[in-house]
Image (tube, coloured by chain):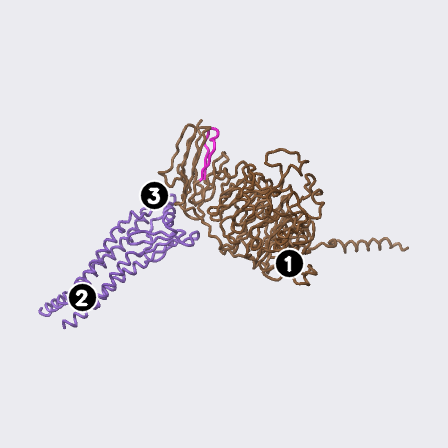
Amino acid sequence: MSKHFPLFVGASLAVALLATAGCNPPGARAAVAGDSSAAAKSYVPPGEKDEFYLFYSGGHSGQVYVAGLPSMRHISTIPVFAPYPATGYGFDQESKQMMGRFTWGDVHHPGLSQRGGKYDGRWLFVNDNANNRIARIDLRDFKTRQILGPIPNSSGNHGSSFVTENSEYVLVASRFSVPLPKGRYADPSAYKTEFNGMVSGIKVDPANGTMSVGWQVLTPPFNWDLGSTGKGPSSGWAFWTSYNSEMAHETLEANSTQGERDYAAIVNWRAAEQAVKEGKATMLDGVPVLDPAKVAGVIYFLPVPKSPHGIDTDPSGRWIAASGKLQPVTSVFDFEKIQKAIAAKAFDGDVRGIPVIKYEAVIEGEIPVGLGPLHTQYDGKGNAYTSLYVESAVAKWTLPPWNDEQKKNLNAVVTDKIPVHFNIGHLVVGGSDTKEPYGKYLVAMNKLSKGRHISVGPSQPESSQLIDISGQKMAMLYEAYTEPEPHFAQILKADAIAPIEVYPKAENQHPKAAWDASQTGVTRTGNKVEVKMVAIRSRFLPDKIEVKAGDEVTIHVTNVEQTTDMIHGLGIIEHDMNVVVDPGETKTVKFVAGKPGVYPFYCTNFCSALHQEMQGYLAVKP
Amino acid sequence: MTRTTSRVSAMHGILDRPVNRTGRILLLAATLLLLLGGTLPLWRISLVAPQYAEGLTLDMYAYQIVAGNKGQDLAEINTLNHYIGMKPIAQADFLEMKVLPFAIGIFALLALRSVVIGRIVTLVDLSVLFLYFGVFSLGSFAYRLYTYGHQLDPRAPMKIAPFMPVVMGSQQIANFVQTSLPLAGTICMTAFLVLLIAALVSSIRQARREVL
């Protein structure tokens, strides 16, 4: 053996190591770098405007984010369930009362109001998964105008906000079952017998959008997940998926995933409305509740592949795609077959008096879209787009009717796939839930953004990706980041609405509004001090308020400006108070004057050249 | 001497002649234009700045001020002007807006009188008076602008040198481009005078032919 042998072996090893050092493990793919020629397609030059609004749900931020498409630029945040000092939301009396005793919410699924199955641009409804509420944002001024709830007999408002064809209702289903009525105690081990879920019809006043709880339908304690409303042939119907039809109450991860199928609910909401009118409901916590075991024809169950998530009606209203996140298929059901099956009573028994529709009688096909399919959106041209959570991709496939060849091999209907980064949840195509989708763009809302942006430490934003769907092949255009955490979103054509930018003086109905110096003043009744104040460039009238320590102070501040973006704020030092008043608006704040001393107040929203000088004093006497 | 006397008497002869048919038609049209002009905006003052790209406008009528953006531009202009200590612009302060409609009425009546029983001399009177009225109004308008630009509150937050707002044309004032231009009403008024003179010329020509 040569004495050089060890040297030779050492050298060989070194070379081998060097050769492999730069290699990725098998399967690793380099982060896909965007094609810079795509930039022009999402570029909106300074001074030009976006074509669409994108209304993102803000998840547990409790808010709604507004971005423009195709630029993906964040334009504004609409506070809904959480205080937002930037616009003074949650500080003035009106918004405080609307928020009630809660300071956060969990916004999941925004739903635009519709008329005739198309967006009418009046309202945006959003749900609060956490505190069982639903809110209405008026698109005239992009302000939250009503928060309804907590909805009685409903817990975990995840399965909303699904708006019916003419905004008759916003439909809601409970994610978490609890003993009903709420406030009643039962041991969670008695889950199957003592707990119940609920589907609710939230009635919308067509004149002004005011919401009220219309009726409810009692369900077994499945965890209702996501839904959609019908149109065309499925008009008057609504659909929800569920998980945990095993009705497990602990370690759901394992106990609720044992069955091969879970149930979707097929709800005839028009029949429910009619049954309530006919007096077939029983009152529970002030709401007429239908028990489907006693009232037939209101709800049916449909088995769908295990632990489904999304169930989305196509623009024609005939095809319903449900995706089982633990199965690599999307199941397409034919609503015409569902109606025939109901008429022919093609049932596989019932669950607590609710008929279970035969799967085979209504399934059109199970499409092998990929791993972890969640939600499906439609472009109105016969294509469907399904998000693949596990696979981190979007699959494009063709809706039925299919030819014989396609039917034999449903792999063939999957026409394209594009990777997204990473773990996509919802996706949105403009108008997918209407009769006339806009198509054009798809926004993929990804749950993990890891490594896609310059590092911001352990708290990570979410990533959204803009995909061009106007061609045969999907094309990645742009990527943006949002605060946690968009779930679903809605896209609205910018020219579908014409929001006001100033509240006209003539419309101000506030009884304590002051428009000029002569209407301002400070009045005292006992230990209550009421101030009528004007905010105008660049002063407050009055700019001195004298009170005594412990006084309850109410300030009605009117921003008398009538020009766009001339917004004034009123921040009071060391009083945890900041209200922001839009042009033409009057807001009322109430607080207890603190310890003796002099507390400056000032305009918090930069208004004019003499904004710094816009200040005054709250003088608190001992 | 006789030549001069005869010339004067010839002129008097012509001035005493009635307004001819063409003149009457022109005069009637002129009266209608005058009345129309009284209802239309006479002058527009507009202010354009980067943050007011669409411009703030004031339209001056014979009897009112109409501000752009449903009237809000007046409040906005006054709010901005308070920084330099300019007196708020208020319609009530414009005495002209009470006098002008009355004056237009008088001119219309006089013109109508000439249509029916007018002699050439009345057209001369009308032309001279209306010209005077026009020049006086324009002068008064310019003086108003001068006053607004010169009577600045010394306690104003922003001190600027007194200035003359432009009456016709454009100029830069701080970050604003101020433009002031006549509108349809003024064109109608001018047309009134032009038609009046046309009626006068036509009548004189015909009278001369007839006298000679």
Residue at the far left in the pictured view = B2
* Kind of residue at disc 2: Val
Q: CA distance from mark 2 to mark 1?
A: 87 Å
Residue A156 among those drawn in magenta? no
Q: Is residue B191 left or right of residue A398?
A: left
Residue corresponding to mark 1: A397
Q: Name the residue type under label 1.
A: Trp
Query: Looking at the picture, how far across and down is residue A19, in whole percent?
Result: 77, 56
List the residue tagged with mark 2: B19
Q: Is residue A595 magenta?
A: yes
| Mark before the other along the chain sequence, 2 or 3 | 2
Horizontal side, residue A73 vs residue B151: left or right: right
Q: Nearer the viewer, mark 2 or mark 1?
A: 1
Magenta region: which residues? A587-602
- Please say whether residue A478 is visible from this viewpoint: no
Q: Secondary structure at mark 2?
A: loop
Quadrant location, the N terminus of chain A? bottom right
Q: Are marks 3 and 1 in contact (CB under 8 Å)?
A: no
Look at the image and give the colour of chain B.
Answer: purple
Q: Quadrant of residue A551?
A: top left
Classify 10 Å Cα crowding around label 1: few (below 14), some (14-19), many (20 and above).
Answer: many
Which chain is disc 3 placed on?
B
Q: Identity of the amino acid at label 3?
A: Pro
- Which chain did the image draw in brown? A
Labels 2 and 1 in the same subunit: no
Q: Secondary structure at mark 1?
A: strand
Front in this rendered view, residue B49 or B74: B74
Residue at numbered disc 3: B154
